[in-house]
Amino acid sequence: MTKIKEPIWVIGCNNSGTTILRNTILSHKNVCGPTIDGQELPGMPKIMTHYLGDMFSRLWTHPNTKLNYYVDESFYNEEIKCEIINAYKPYLKPGKTFISKSPTDVIRTRFIQACFPDTKFIGIVRNGYAVSEGTIRKRKEDPDRHFLKGLFTSIDQAAEHWFRANVMILSNQTHLNNYLIIQYEDLVEKPKETLHQVLDFCSLEKEGFQIPTFQTNLNKIQISTLNEYELETVTRIAQPMLIHFGYEILGPDFKW
């Protein structure tokens, strides 16, 4: 069987920066992997895919769906592991560290670790107000996934999803052997410091690695579109996680 040694797995709630983090690490000369989400690769076993369909895209921690997707080490078997490796095989390169990401892997981490015990997981967290706005907007129309269009999402659903996803990100600390949590805001505002931390965690050389620049005002742009009711709803539902990660609690009088 082909072996995947010390892979990197990027996880996080959708719209939290998993893609830019994966793509940035993938630009390292000693890293390889697909440029699409692992769950979208041909041949990936059902257990690793978004098999409930488009209606639950970006809402995979909703109470009605989470228990369908949640898998832990008890689901492990060699056959499924082989199927996962075969799906990733076209992207493996000798001597390079493999990287994958799918937001829904937040609730598959214990299973992934059972398949690849030396996995290095990186969880990324972003401001819940901005993520909730992005969830609603991209379920309505996603420029990267044109087949997802016209899916109505309430601010309650979006906020609950962010809250529950980040509860899972925190709870993973109890179960994962190699785990680093970073925040999107640190990545875009302090890219050198944050990415050097990531590279050290992944045992990747810093020398020669090009530090990119990121757009730093996306949170401001997205949050500014939320109305008073939407701000209050996100606060009501997600306040414990917002406080835990140090995000300012926004009310009806909030102005930039």
Image: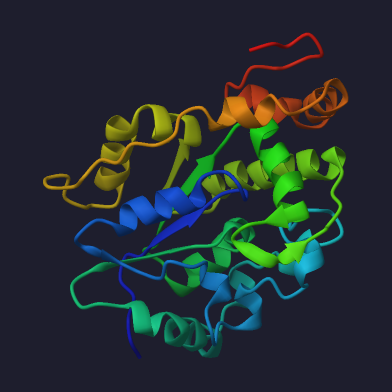
Residue drawn at 73 percent across, 11 percent down: 254
Residue 131 coordinates in the image, percent (x, y): 66, 39
For residue 30, above or below residue 90: above
* 182 on left or right of 206: right
* 202 on left or right of 84: left
Residue drawn at 36 percent across, 69 percent down: 33
Residue 178 can be seen, yes or no? no
Residue 135 coordinates in the image, percent (x, y): 71, 46
Residue 99 can be seen, yes or no? yes
For residue 245, above or below residue 78: above
* 233 on left or right of 224: right
Count numbered badges in the picture: 0
- Give the image's coloring scheme: rainbow
Residue drawn at 86 percent across, 52 percent down: 152
Q: Residue 163 lies in what quarter of the image?
A: top right
Residue drawn at 41 percent across, 67 percent down: 117
Q: Residue 143 lies in what quarter of the image?
A: bottom right
For residue 11, above or below residue 42: above
Residue 175 coordinates in the image, percent (x, y): 54, 53
Q: In which quarter of the image is the C terminus?
A: top right
Q: Quadrant of the N terminus?
A: bottom left
For residue 48, above or below residue 173: below
Residue 45 coordinates in the image, percent (x, y): 60, 83
